[in-house]
Image (cartoon, rainbow, N blue to C red):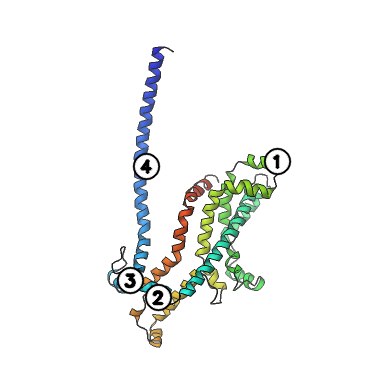
């Protein structure tokens, strides 16, 4: 190679390095601006939660006089004493019931939705278009509250049972469609190779599809877990026994009793004073007790959360 050729190659590398460096500098500036904007947005999203936590640890008189604080001004545990001190056993039982319902419901719902999504994602399934439309149609129209109540209570007789809190929420059409889109991104050649080797459909689903769809399953699993944990309407509608209630239902009934105590007639009958019962701080303490476990669980799903959303939204 001649000296002129070597000189031209070095000059080309230098110029390309300058261009790459300029692009990198521009990209770094955009990244810094994006990080600053997202940091500000994250702080704005955290402020309501900080207000809730600070209010729950504040005294009722301070909240009424100075409003909701971001930082605790007058520390007090009166709200938690009212919430936990007099009904600790009830709260523990409600936590146990909610954990059981959320755990079993999340497993069954994720299993059912993933199986349905796998079937709809198969290219060689000739009914996948019709079934996809049928599932999507149920997102627009449902049977109605009264027919659903009659079916669950009169036909299946599930009222006041564990399964009435699990089965009505097992199949979610929206989650099926998201998982179907995610599984469509898995190479179909893997399935064909496994079938050539003699693998059954259940073996393909369990050993190939589920491991590759782990980010999407974790993302949808978090949604399902939050759905079961925050569910209260089914419990209020179908559960009448006081010894079987979820955490959300217990907090709603407790809030209703507190509001009844603040009624003028109830105050006369029970000889209670308003200052003896925290109102605003008690509400915030209920929020902390109900949302606390989910705030602890979320970081464990975070590494799958963004990837599951982005990959599942690429293909239509």
Label 2 or label 3, whichever comes before in sequence order: 3
Q: Nearer the viewer, residue 184 or 166?
A: 166
Residue 171 visible somewhere in the drawing: no
- Numbered circle sitting on residue 76: 3
Q: Are marks 1 and 3 in contact (CB under 8 Å)?
A: no
The span from disc 2 to disc 4 (Cα, nearest Å) is 48 Å
Q: In front of the other: label 1 or label 4?
A: 1
Q: Residue at x 58, y 56 (%)?
A: 110
Label 1 or label 4, whichever comes before in sequence order: 4
Q: Secondary structure at mark 4?
A: helix
Q: Are marks 4 and 3 in contact (CB under 8 Å)?
A: no
Label 2 or label 4, whichever comes before in sequence order: 4
Q: Residues within 10 Å of mark 4 (few under 14, many from 20)?
A: few
Query: Which residue carries the number 1 mark?
Result: 197
Image position, residue 248 (x, y; %): 49, 69
Task: Examine the image and state in which quarter residue 82 appears.
Answer: bottom left
Q: Residues within 10 Å of mark 2 (few under 14, many from 20)?
A: some
Q: Nearer the viewer, residue 130 or 107?
A: 107
- Numbered circle sitting on residue 72: none
Left/right placement of residue 254 relative to residue 68 reads right
Q: In front of the other: label 2 or label 4?
A: 2
Q: Residue at x 57, y 51 (%)?
A: 179
Q: Nearer the viewer, residue 274 or 149?
A: 274
Q: Secondary structure at mark 1?
A: loop
Image position, residue 145 (x, y; %): 57, 69
Query: Which residue carries the number 4 mark?
Result: 31
Query: Which residue carries the number 2 mark?
Result: 82
**Quick check: 10 above or below 312?**
above
Image position, residue 31 (x, y; %): 37, 42
The span from disc 2 to disc 3 (Cα, nearest Å) is 12 Å
The span from disc 1 to disc 4 (Cα, nearest Å) is 47 Å
């Amino acid at each position: 190679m001649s000296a002129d050729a070597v000189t031209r190659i070095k000059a080309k590398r230098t110029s390309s390095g300058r261009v790459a460096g300029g692009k990198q500098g521009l990209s770094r500036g955009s990244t810094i601006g994006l990080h600053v904007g997202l940091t500000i947005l994250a702080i704005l999203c955290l402020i309501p939660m900080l207000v809730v936590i600070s209010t729950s640890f504040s005294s009722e008189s301070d909240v009424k006089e100075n409003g909701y604080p971001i930082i605790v001004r007058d520390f007090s545990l009166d709200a938690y004493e009212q919430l936990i001190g007099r009904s600790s056993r009830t709260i523990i039982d409600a936590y146990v019931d909610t954990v059981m319902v959320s755990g079993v419901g999340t497993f069954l719902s994720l299993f059912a939705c993933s199986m349905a999504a796998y079937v709809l994602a198969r290219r060689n399934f000739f009914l996948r278009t019709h079934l996809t439309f049928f599932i999507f149609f149920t997102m627009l129209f449902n049977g109605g509250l009264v027919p659903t109540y009659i079916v669950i209570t009169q036909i299946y007789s599930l009222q006041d049972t564990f399964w009435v809190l699990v089965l009505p929420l097992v199949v979610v059409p929206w989650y099926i469609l998201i998982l179907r889109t995610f599984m469509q991104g898995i190479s179909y050649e893997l399935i064909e190779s496994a079938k050539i080797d003699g693998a059954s459909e259940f073996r393909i689903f369990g050993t190939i599809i589920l491991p590759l769809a782990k980010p999407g399953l974790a993302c949808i699993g978090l949604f399902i877990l939050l759905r079961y944990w925050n569910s209260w309407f089914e419990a209020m509608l179908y559960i009448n026994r006081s010894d079987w209630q979820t955490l959300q239902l217990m907090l709603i009934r407790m809030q209703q009793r507190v509001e009844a105590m603040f009624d003028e007639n109830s105050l006369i009958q029970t000889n209670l004073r308003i200052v003896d019962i925290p109102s605003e701080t008690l509400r915030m303490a209920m929020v902390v007790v109900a949302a606390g476990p989910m705030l602890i669980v979320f970081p464990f799903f975070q590494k799958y959360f963004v990837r599951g959303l982005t990959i599942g939204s690429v293909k239509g």
